[in-house]
Image (cartoon, rainbow, N blue to C red):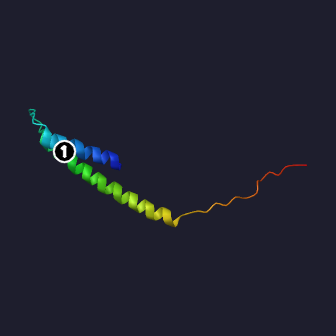
Amino acid sequence: MYIGSSIFMIALGAILKFAVTATVAGFNIQTAGVILIVAGIIGLVVSLIMMASADRRGARDVEVVREREPVARERY
């Protein structure tokens, strides 16, 4: 789950929790909103942790590539 989809889930959950007043038999819309908010927050935290750990790994494994002579040389 990426940061954008996590924020989308949080926003959608907030809309369902606080803005929708409709009721459906056998399904609580506000509870679904809370579940989406919690899942979005968990996804956001996991995404940020993974992104931070990837940045630290990438800083150590920097490979420097220098230009070198072409393998095939021109014939005269």
- In the rendered structure, the answer to whether residue 54 lies left or right of residue 33 reads right
Q: Residue at x 70, y 58 (%)?
A: 67
Residue tagged by mark 1?
14
Residue 51 rendering spot, x and y as whole percentages: 39, 57
User: At which x and y percent is residue 76?
Assistant: 91, 49
The amino acid marked with disc number 1 is Ala
What residue appears at the point 18 percent right and 41 percent down from the top-left corner? 15
> How many numbered tags mark residues here?
1
Name the residue located 49 percent from the left edge and 62 percent from the top edge: 58
- Residue furthest to the front in view is 19
The residue at 41%/62% (across/down) is: 53
Spot the residue most to the bottom.
60
Q: Secondary structure at mark 1?
A: helix
Residue 52 is left or right of residue 66, and the answer is: left
Left or right, residue 65 beside residue 29: right
Which residue is at the front of the view, 7 or 36? 7
4 is higher (above) or lower (below) than 69: above
Callout 1 crowding tier (Cα within 10 Å): few <14, some 14–19, many ≥20 = some
Instruction: Say above or below: 24 vs 8.
Output: above
Q: Quadrant of residue 68?
A: bottom right
Q: Looking at the image, which residue sits at the far right?
A: 76
**Residue 21: x %, y % from top left:** 9, 36
